[in-house]
């Protein structure tokens, strides 16, 4: 299960080029018996992800990849509130025996270095405190590169999505069972 925002949903891309779809293709090619569910909602904040957590976890969820926070940062929402929301998501998923992978995000620099540092530390601190697998920056190698993003400069294009999928796969694959 990928719980996220437009970066997970694959905004601006054909469905098969979204990161969760690319992960599904990788799983299939590697012989894993998992079905990836894309629970990405464009514009979602950590609070939005938390509000739809229960129905997202209905069924037989083995692994939850959490990709939330980008919109919290774009809106300048308090990092402490984002941390509280993400912590509740992690705690509730783990209480169901679900393996959690948390992906980090960076805040835009226009809110200043203090906000940016506090925002960044939320993800690392949660991963450490709850002993979950961690991808420090979901858009590592893609953010800020115009050749890997759509015209908006925020959302990966097909090539950028493949890079993100490879990054996520490095953390996801070790927690899977054949």
Image (cartoon, rainbow, N blue to C red):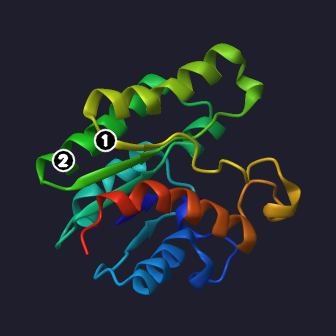
From the viewer's perspective, tell me whether residue 158 is left or right of residue 127.
right
Residue 15 location in percent, x, y? 58, 82
Of helix, strand and loop, which one carries label 2? helix
Q: Residue at x 68, y 77 (%)?
A: 13
Picture quarter containing residue 63?
bottom left
- Is residue 6 visible to the viewer in this orientation of the structure? no
| CA separation in Å, label 2 and label 1 | 9 Å
From the viewer's perspective, tell me whether residue 110 is left or right of residue 162.
right
Quadrant of the drawing holding the C terminus:
bottom left
Q: Nearer the viewer, residue 55 or 145?
A: 145
Which residue has dot 2 on it? 94
In the drawing, what numbered circle is on residue 132?
1
Q: Nearer the viewer, residue 177 or 41?
A: 177
Q: Residues within 10 Å of mark 2 (few under 14, many from 20)?
A: some
Residue 172 location in percent, x, y? 40, 59
Residue 5 location in percent, x, y? 52, 57
């Amino acid at each position: 299960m990928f719980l996220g925002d437009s970066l997970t949903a694959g905004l601006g891309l054909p469905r098969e080029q979204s990161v969760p779809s690319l992960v599904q293709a990788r799983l299939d090619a590697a012989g894993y018996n998992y079905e990836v569910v894309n629970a990405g909602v464009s514009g979602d904040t950590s609070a939005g992800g938390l509000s739809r957590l229960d129905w997202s976890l209905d069924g037989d969820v083995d692994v939850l990849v959490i990709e939330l926070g980008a919109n919290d940062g774009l809106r300048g929402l308090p990092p402490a509130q984002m941390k509280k929301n993400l912590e509740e998501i992690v705690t509730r998923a783990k209480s169901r025996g679900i393996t959690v992978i948390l992906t980090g995000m960076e805040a835009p620099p226009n809110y200043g270095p203090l906000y940016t540092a506090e925002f960044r530390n939320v993800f690392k601190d949660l991963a450490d405190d709850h002993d979950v697998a961690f991808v420090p920056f979901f858009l590592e190698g893609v953010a800020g590169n115009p050749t890997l993003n759509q015209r908006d400069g925020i959302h990966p294009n097909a090539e950028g999505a493949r890079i993100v999928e490879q990054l996520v796969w490095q953390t996801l694959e070790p927690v899977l069972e054949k």
